[in-house]
Image (cartoon, rainbow, N blue to C red):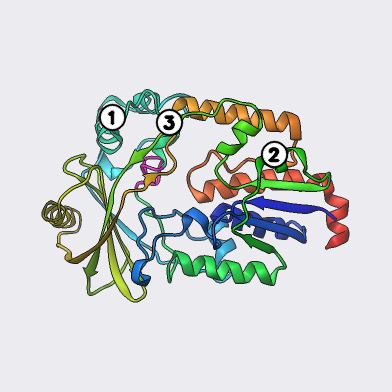
Amino acid sequence: MTKVRIVGGGLTGVLAAFEAHRLGCRDIEIHERLEQLGGDDLPDRPQGLELRDEQIDFGPRGGPLRRMLEWRGVAFDEVDGDQAGAFGPGQTLPPVAPTGGSLADWIRAHPPKVAEALGRYCQWRLSAWLDEMDESAAAPLGLDGRMIAPPTPPRGGVAAMFGACLHALRDLGVKVRTQDLVSPWRVLQARAPDETVVWAADPTPLFKACDLPTPKQLYVSSPTYFFRLDHEAAAPIHIRNLAAEGVVAELRGYESRGESVLAVECVAEAPDALLRREICRLAVEARGTGLAVGEQLGVSLRPRRGYRSADAAHQLKRLRLHLAETAGEAIVTDAWEPFAPADRFAALRVGLAAALARHAPAIEAAA
């Protein structure tokens, strides 16, 4: 019987399990190194409140990823996005062809006035050499065509979403093994002939296992402060500061356990009084009214995910090529490069379908 082994129990791993089952596979295992499904996608929850330092973009309403999760019992709250400052008429970016290079190359591909504003904004957000950063960094900055469409949070919270997914996976017969660290050598050298592996975790350990140089990690630190939010509408809020001024980059308001929380993503650490002044200024500029901000709940200093140097992006492609040459389609790596989960899911569907097509007769017999 064909088996699908999924390394990593975050959102990508969960979606891989759902998709493998949809394609007819019935022997599916998820291996998550942490103690519960969700892995690094789960926010901290002091006193039960979710402190979401990064918001997951599930794509548009009616998209394949949203439909897959909604089918499994996950609901979403739509968000109206606001922006302080803009790059041009309509507050959208003109599409450009991929440059295949650095973030600086991507910026220079835009019209001069837009490129000037983009360069100023990216330097303000990242405080890094833009020539050394891969062009894919535009996506986590929200500059890849999704500027007007803010992320849609799962209703009830991220932990509740993974809880619903866990129940759905168990109902499908998927084995979920937590606190289970899978060795990359086990995947590369002791994989069964009828086994397909989806590597949905950080691919960094695979470099050493493949005898390839491990690329230097690029860490972008953006502290996020959390406040209790007194907001009568209690609706999701998303305000992006495109003016590249001050210290606050984004405001994201959401509900957690019946309370409203405001996540304030910054470009540098800042004192409480300055944060409150900038929150008020951005809210008034973007929405015409301020926000009633209560006590500070905490701060997250975790490095941001999704940012790669141009060299790291090149080395990741080398790793994928090496695995394709040595393992063929038996190891699915298609979800590595895209930042947005909807894009990862689209790539994952293609790669998983190709991998399982090798065992089509066995899958049809098992189904």
For the residues labelled 3 and 2, the Cα–Cα distance comes to: 31 Å
Magenta-colored span: 140-147
Residue 146 magenta-drawn? yes
Closest to the camera, between mark 1 and mark 2, is 2
Left or right position of 337 against 17: left
- Side of 87 relative to 140 (left or right): left
Residue placed most toward the observer, 89 or 343: 343
Can residue 99 be seen here? The reply is: no
* C-alpha distance separating marks 1 and 3: 12 Å
Residue under the image location 17 percent in, 41 percent down: 245
Task: Say what amino acid the circle numbered 3 marks.
Answer: Glu
Which residue is labeled 1 in the image?
A: 119
Q: Residue 200's x, y, as percent?
A: 60, 47
Q: Secondary structure at mark 1?
A: helix
In percent of width and height, residue 335 lies at 58, 43
Q: Residue at x 85, y 56 (%)?
A: 1
In percent of width and height, residue 11 lies at 54, 56
Residue 185 tag number: 2
Q: Amino acid at mark 2?
A: Trp
Amino acid residing under circle 1: Gly
- Main secondary structure of the magenta stretch: loop
Q: Is residue 114 above or below residue 143?
A: above
Lateral position of residue 244 relative to residue 211, left or right: left
The residue singled out by tag 3 in the image is 135
Can residue 257 be found in the magenta stretch? Answer: no
Local secondary structure at mark 2 = helix
For residue 125, above or below residue 280: above
